[in-house]
Image: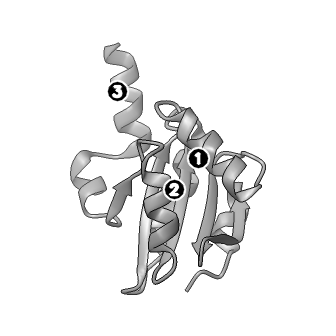
């Protein structure tokens, strides 16, 4: 277990680095889905589906956090796929987007207006 904690810290960075990153809301419960859909009527919602055990997902999340500056009408939600796979599956089904990891879905007016996975996330033009 100690070795796994070391690897997680090594790949994910220190907690201090994570606190300095983007202001993520944690998407942990299926009940949040309808609230997020309602929120998307007035705000842009970005869902980042992330696997904490996947080197590509860790790298893409880090690069995303370094390069993305959300505007004041964008809310960011992070889905930990290993802990909340049911949430990820519900998102895929609701927005008719095949599950991938890592993956970003942009939700506007109750619909997925764009999505990308893996390194394509970094080329989405989200600004």
Q: Position of residue 31 (x, y in %)?
A: 43, 47
Camera-side residue of 72 and 16: 72
**Residue 54 sits in which quadrant?**
top right
Q: Earlier in the sequence, mark 1 or mark 3?
A: 3
- Relative to 25, say whether 42 is above or below: below
Q: Is residue 46 above or below residue 49?
A: below
Identify which residue is drawn at 24% across, 47% down.
Answer: 15
Alpha-carbon distance for marks 1 and 2? 6 Å
Helix, strand or loop status at disc 1: helix
Residue named by callout 2: 61
Q: Which quadrant of the rendered structure holds the C terminus?
A: bottom right
Q: Viewer-proximal residue, 12 or 38? A: 38
Would you say the residues marked 1 and 2 are in contact, meaning their CB atoms lie under 8 Å apart?
yes
Left or right: where 53 falls relative to 89? left
Q: Residue at left 59%, top 43%?
A: 88
| Front of the two marks 1 and 3 | 1
Provide the residue designation for mark 1: 57
Element at badge 2?
A: helix
Percent of width and height locating residue 109: 59, 78
Residue 92 marker: none
The coloring applied to the image is one colour
Residue sitting at x 49%, y 35%:
84
């Amino acid at each position: 277990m100690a070795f796994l904690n070391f690897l997680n810290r090594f790949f994910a960075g220190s907690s201090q680095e994570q606190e300095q990153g983007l202001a993520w809301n944690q998407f942990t419960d299926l009940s949040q889905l309808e609230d997020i859909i309602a929120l998307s009527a007035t705000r842009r919602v970005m869902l980042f589906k992330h696997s904490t055990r996947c080197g590509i997902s860790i790298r893409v999340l880090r690069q995303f956090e370094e390069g993305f500056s959300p505007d004041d009408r964008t809310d960011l939600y992070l889905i930990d796929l290993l802990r909340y796979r049911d949430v990820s599956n519900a998102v895929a089904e609701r927005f008719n987007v095949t599950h991938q990891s890592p993956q970003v879905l942009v939700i506007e007016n109750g619909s997925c207006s764009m999505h990308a996975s893996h390194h394509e996330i970094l080329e989405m033009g989200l600004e």
